[in-house]
Image: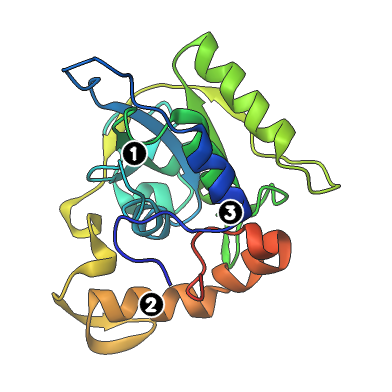
Amino acid sequence: MFDLKTIKTGALIGAIAAGCWIQAGTADAQESRTLTVAGGCFWCVEADFEKVQGVGDVVSGYTGGEIANPTYQQVAGGRTDHYEAVEIPYDPDEVSYGQLLDLFLRSVDPLDAGGQFCDRGDQYRTAIFVESPEQRRAAEEAIAEAELGQQIVTPILEAGPFYEAEDYHQDYYKSDERIAFSTVGLGVPKSVAYERYRDRCGRDARIERIWGSDAPFLPSS
């Protein structure tokens, strides 16, 4: 099980940790940077990456479509071209862009072009959004290194406007606020509803089948 703000130990994470560096003799830390990805339900991606040392407050939102300021109802209903996505702010003195990409690819099903797990539709597809040629090269390298013996369908797309999701969706996985009705229970805290949803959607079970011990965010890790 992950401790808060701790990256999974093991062969993959050991290799990642070995690549971390902090510039000697530099007094000022580098400015925070951002990785934008889509990995299915944004609650789950937010919950996963807020466990990673060097990552700040992950923001759930929508990107990749033409409509400005879309609502959750529009996106979830498939009425826009947006993805459910997250912005992951990180300190490059603690974790690199490439390391985060490695973690991302191993926390989703990059073989599925029709959605993720029980969530079907274009809004739940995976994607990596890049802002520069350097980020594109890093994403291409991460995909090339994620060897599964099958075609990885996660696209690398040019970043566009990112619209923050409604407050209701932010930090959903750890909220004690109770919801009157949900598909996983009545009057339960959001945190409980989230755990039940994630389990019933089969996210972790599928990731374990694909990635095995390389999966960084499994409950047993």
Per the model, the C-alpha gap separating discs 1 and 2 is: 21 Å
> N-terminal of the two: label 2 or label 3?
3
Q: Horizontally, is 217 left or right of 32 in the view?
A: right
Q: How is the image coloured?
A: rainbow
On the image, the x and y values in percent for residue 177 come to 13, 75
> N-terminal of the two: label 1 or label 2?
1
> Which dot marks residue 195?
2
* Residue 30 shows up from this direction: yes
Residue drawn at (65%, 68%), measured in percent from left and top?
208
Q: Is residue 24 above or below residue 149?
A: above
Which secondary structure, mark 2?
helix
Quadrant of the snapshot with the N terminus: bottom left
Q: Which residue is mark 3?
A: 108
On the image, the x and y values in percent for residue 193 come to 32, 79
Residue drawn at (52%, 30%), measured in percent from left and top?
98
Task: Give, as a three-letter code, the residue at label 2.
Answer: Glu
Residue drawn at (44%, 33%), measured in percent from left and top?
20
Per the model, the C-alpha gap separating discs 2 and 3 is: 17 Å
Task: Give, as a three-letter code, the residue at label 3.
Answer: Val
- Badge 3: residue crowd in 10 Å (few <14, some 14–19, many ≥20): many
On the image, the x and y values in percent for residue 109 come to 64, 54
Which secondary structure, mark 3?
loop
Q: Which residue is mark 1?
A: 88
Task: Give, as a three-letter code, the residue at label 1.
Answer: Ile
